[in-house]
Amino acid sequence: MMTPKQYEESLRKLNLVVYMFGKRVKNVVDDPIIRPSMNAVAYTYKLAGDPEYQDIMTAISHISGKRINRFTHIHQSTEDLVKKTKMGRLLGSHTGCCFQRCVGMDSLNALSVVTYDIDQKYQTSYNKRFLSYLEMAQDKDLVIDGAMTDPKGDRGLPPHKQSDPDMFLRVVEERADGIVVRGAKAHQTGAVNSHEIIIMPTISLGEEDKDYAVSFALPSDAPGITYIMGRQSCDTRKLEGGTIDMGNRFFGGHEALVVFDDVFVPWDRIFMYKEFEFAGKLVEVFASYHRQSYACKTGVGDVLIGATQTIAEYNGVEKASHIKDKIIEMNHLNETLFCGSLACASEGHKEPSGTYCVNTLLANVCKQNVTRFPYVIGRLAQDVAGGLMVTLPSEQDFRSPETGKWVEKYFKGNATVSTENRMRILRLIENLTLGTAAVGYLTESMHGAGSPQAQRIMIARQVNMKEKQKHAKKLSGITED
């Protein structure tokens, strides 16, 4: 397995085409806006190499028998699924942000299931290709960006009826040595911190859309791939040189639009090719895994709850009964999220491929709660923190010889706590609920792994309503012909 330093050096060898603020980024690894997100991924390598966390962060490969990073592991038991949940919370609490590797892990596991199923129906060799690719990714300890979300264009139309057919990524040419694809993938978490990118369809497809039923893997710097960095609130604070106004001094996340401009894919990297009837299953299996992955939000929630308790003490209000009650509610909601992820893992099952998958119903219930509870936790954090969280002067004003003495004097709370420390914890709460980390904690909680309605549709499909009715009718004495 790689060390954090080896991971950083591996990224320096990539020739990524990355644009931000209208200009190409010359040094992706050291760019001050991107660097905190790279630090978060590097931390996954650090914990994997720490004996204290070995059981959670690593696993034994079912292919090679070697110890590997859990982010490249294929789940072999419900115990593996439970450890995945615990890993997400652990890393969320250590980084306070999105650590960007869950989508790749979930993509690998979904393809492990679906490539096997395609082979069983069509006697293809996708699963063999996939396992060969997987062994390579495990041996090299790679970061993989799982890419499912297309721009979609007009949401009321299927891919083949779009005015611009590139609104969903598609095959535009078939060659003897492979295929050529065109399109884009949006909202790609950690894309420029990844060694590889795995493409999957984004919706169920019909025969008329078979050119869109494609899944493959490529190096992240393959010719024709361009990354356009997404904008985040407060992102340019990282350019100011200070440490207070960033909130989270060490870590962050990023998203990107990934454009495929007639990109060539060799046959040995293709895991689905026009088997349109399996697109929906791949989406659903991936979504179930990824909805479980939102255990990471409980880790970030741990940080926010800790910051809220701290600011209550710094403000001198920690003993007030209503403050105590609000923090209890934050803990209750956060632990409820953790329960959901643990439940869908514990109730997992073995697929024909041998891969273990989570309970689909409970995974969707878990994610439905994630679309709600972090917003309440964030509101309570802002409530306890007070308005100074969003009216606090800048670090430059605090450091200024002209204004610093006034900031120091008038923004002091508890006399035993420095003004600087009070400012730091306020900025962290701002970062988690309004700033760059809010992308990964709040908005991603809402839309990541599908919108809230997507989970409600799956809940409706998975619930056994006839069984519930049978019990109700039996207990009330109803008999029907």
Image (cartoon, grey):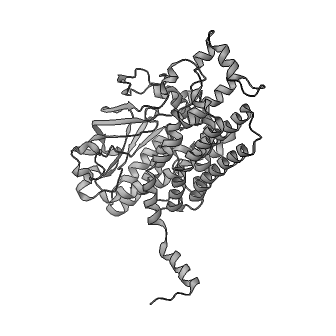
Q: Residue 62 location, x and y as percent?
A: 53, 51
Quick one: 203 or 445, which is closer to the camera? 445
Q: Residue 179 location, x and y as percent?
A: 26, 43
Residue 310 is left or right of residue 156, and the answer is right
Q: In the current view of this chain or complex, which residue is farthest to the top?
A: 401
Residue located at (58% from left, 83% from top): 475
Residue 324 is left or right of residue 4, and the answer is right
Q: Residue 164 location, x and y as percent?
A: 22, 43
Residue 326 is left or right of residue 280, and the answer is right
Quick one: 376 or 39, which is closer to the camera? 376
Give the quadrant of the C terminus. bottom left
Q: Number of callouts in the render?
A: 0
Q: Let me know if residue 363 appears in the view.
A: yes
Quick one: 138 or 475, which is closer to the camera? 475
Q: Residue 73 location, x and y as percent?
A: 53, 47
Toward which corner of the image does residue 299 lie, by quadrant?
top right
Residue located at (77% from left, 40% from top): 319
Residue located at (29% from left, 40% from top): 183
Residue located at (43% from left, 51% from top): 451
Toward which corner of the image does residue 307 lie, by quadrant?
top right
Position of residue 192 relative to residue 326, above or below, is above
Toward which corner of the image does residue 476 lie, by quadrant?
bottom right
Give the quadrant of the N terminus. top right
Position of residue 297 relative to residue 76, above or below, is above
Q: Let me know if residue 357 appears in the view.
A: no
